[in-house]
Image: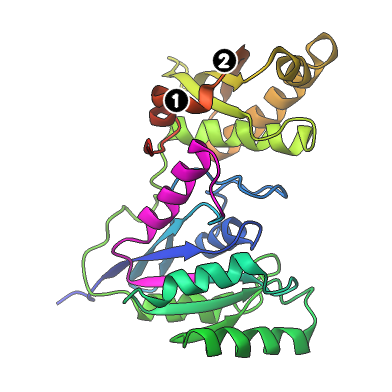
């Protein structure tokens, strides 16, 4: 008889900027979800696959749950709660350094009615005030009794082995869903779009609001084994197009160079990346764009 495999789903929820993507990446052991200092960068249900002993832990990295105003916001929140459906564990990630604001308490209230086991993960313990951490843990457990409480730092790795072991122990017996060497269910096409979008955020910070999307139009294997990727960056106004292009095309070249270098590492082969910027007014009201970036249309 072989060793029994275990496999289950962990929905990672939390307010924007709690460190959810960084935590998923740290548990998986490599980068699968995009990480950016700007809140609300995760738009789709990106899943990381973490292995611990005989357990395969499927981590659904949900978009930050916040008060939706536009259709795009509503689609992101629907994806977040959709990611929590049928989970074996709901893992609430809270920024241990910040305060317990309205966003956190709203999520705790939303979790209260759900039957799944709930774990509280206080993140950023490396930079948080220790007494404040204990106060946060106590207050949150008074609001909602969590099955487990963990103090971790996704950035330094503090507390992660204990968290990973506990998650593995909570996974039900069952065959693994993914081969051992596959860390994410995000298709290469979608991963490529996420990497480019991360560069847009990192390089343009305040200049470009969330009025941008990246579509991978073509993803081809060349005979020499390299990948040829064509992407379009959608913006809402000509002024935004000018920002993305930069003086003499300098900005888009820099975005392309950084994204190409990262994709070559992630895809483990040379990458030829071609970017162009298209002005598409009201793209966030276009049903086909949602399909292309992996979100459901929400009325």
Q: Nearer the viewer, residue 76 or 182?
A: 76
Asked if residue 103 can be seen in this view, the reply is: yes
2 and 1 marks in contact (CB < 8 Å)? yes
In the rendered structure, does residue 80 fall within the stretch colored magenta? yes
Residue 143 screen position, x and y as percent = 53, 85
Magenta stretch: give its range. 67-91
Q: Which residue is drawn at 49% across and 23% down?
A: 216
- Describe the element under mark 2 as helix, strand or loop: loop
Q: Residue at x 48, y 63 (%)?
A: 12
- In the drawing, what numbered circle is on residue 289? 1
Picture layout, residue 35 above or below residue 296: below
The 10 Å Cα crowd at callout 2, few under 14, some 14 to 19, many 20 or more, is some
Picture layout, residue 265 above or below residue 60: above
Query: How did the renderer colour the structure?
Result: rainbow
- The quarter of the picture where residue 176 lies is bottom left
Picture layout, residue 52 above or below residue 139: above
Q: In this view, does 163 lie to the left or right of 243?
A: left
Residue 140 screen position, x and y as percent = 57, 83
Q: Nearer the viewer, residue 177 or 93?
A: 93
- In the drawing, what numbered circle is on residue 280? 2
Q: Is residue 181 left or right of residue 27?
A: left
- Describe the element under mark 1 as helix, strand or loop: helix
- Quadrant that contains the C terminus: top left
In the rendered structure, does residue 208 fall within the stretch colored magenta? no
Residue 172 screen position, x and y as percent = 26, 75
């Amino acid at each position: 008889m072989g060793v029994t495999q275990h496999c289950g789903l962990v929905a990672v929820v939390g307010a924007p900027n709690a460190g959810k993507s960084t935590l998923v990446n740290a548990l998986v052991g490599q980068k699968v979800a995009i990480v950016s200092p700007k809140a609300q960068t995760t738009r789709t249900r990106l899943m990381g696959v973490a292995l611990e002993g005989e357990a395969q832990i499927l981590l659904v990295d949900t978009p930050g749950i916040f008060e939706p105003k536009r259709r795009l916001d509503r689609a992101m929140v629907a994806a977040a709660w959709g990611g929590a459906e049928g989970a074996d564990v709901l893992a609430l990630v809270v920024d241990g350094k910040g305060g317990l604001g309205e966003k956190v308490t709203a999520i705790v209230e939303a979790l209260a009615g759900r039957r799944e086991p709930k774990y509280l993960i206080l993140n950023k313990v490396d930079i948080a005030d220790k007494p404040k951490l204990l106060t946060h843990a106590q207050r949150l457990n008074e609001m909602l009794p969590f099955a487990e409480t963990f103090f971790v730092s996704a950035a330094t790795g503090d507390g992660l082995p204990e968290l990973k072991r506990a998650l593995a122990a909570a996974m039900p017996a069952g065959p693994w869903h993914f081969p051992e060497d596959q860390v994410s269910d995000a298709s290469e096409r979608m991963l490529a779009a996420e990497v480019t979008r991360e560069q847009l955020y990192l390089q343009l910070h305040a200049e470009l609001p969330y009025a941008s999307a990246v579509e991978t139009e073509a993803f081809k294997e060349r005979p020499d084994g390299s990948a040829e990727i064509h992407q379009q960056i959608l913006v809402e106004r000509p002024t935004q197009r000018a920002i993305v292009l930069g003086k003499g095309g300098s900005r888009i070249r820099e975005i392309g160079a950084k994204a190409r270098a990262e994709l070559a590492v992630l895809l483990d082969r040379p990458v030829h990346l071609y970017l162009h910027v298209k002005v598409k007014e009201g793209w966030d009201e276009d049903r086909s764009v949602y399909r292309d970036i992996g979100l459901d249309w929400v009325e």
